[in-house]
Amino acid sequence: MVEATYVAGQTSHLTYRPGEFKVHDLENIGDTELIFTTVEFLDGANPPLPLPAETAVGPQGVGSA
């Protein structure tokens, strides 16, 4: 287990080799709200993780409606 301190606006970009991964199991032990977002890039070394149909959305960005 690792205890970490985060500040508003903090960002990290992590890269993993094929077969590597990271599991997030967060517990907010502070007294302020914790908002945490993970973005999975589709062109990474590992295939994208499957999502349940009710949560999956199509690619967004330039040229999408």
Image (spheres, grey):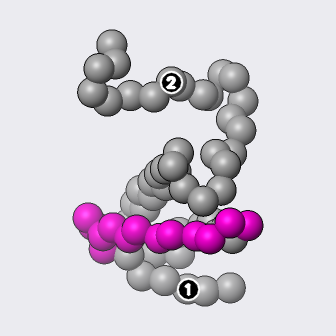
Task: Tell me, yes or no, if residue 48 can be seen here.
Answer: yes
Q: Position of residue 51 (x, y in %)?
A: 68, 35
Assess whether residue 13 is covered by the magenta stretch.
yes
Q: Position of residue 52 (x, y in %)?
A: 72, 30
Q: Quadrant of the N terminus?
A: bottom right
Q: Residue furthest bottom?
A: 2
Residues rendered magenta in the picture:
7-19
* Numbered label tally: 2
Displayed quadrant of residue 36:
bottom left
What secondary structure is the stretch in magenta mostly built from? Answer: loop
Amino acid at pointer 1: Glu
Assess whether residue 45 is covered by the magenta stretch.
no
At horizontal 29% and vertical 20% (from top left) the residue drawn is 63
The residue pinned by badge 1 equals 3
Q: Quadrant of the C terminus?
A: top left
At horizontal 50% and vertical 24% (from top left) the residue drawn is 58
Q: Nearer the viewer, residue 30 or 58?
A: 58
The residue pinned by badge 2 equals 58
- Label 1 sits on a secondary structure element that is loop
At horizontal 61% and vertical 28% (from top left) the residue drawn is 55
| Mark 1 crowd level (few <14, some 14–19, many ≥20, 10 Å Cα) | few
Amino acid at pointer 2: Gly
Tell me how far mark 1 sits from mark 2, CA to CA.
34 Å
Q: Nearer the viewer, residue 7 or 11?
A: 11
Displayed quadrant of residue 16:
bottom right
Q: Residue furthest top?
A: 65
Task: Tell me, yes or no, if residue 31 can be seen here.
Answer: no
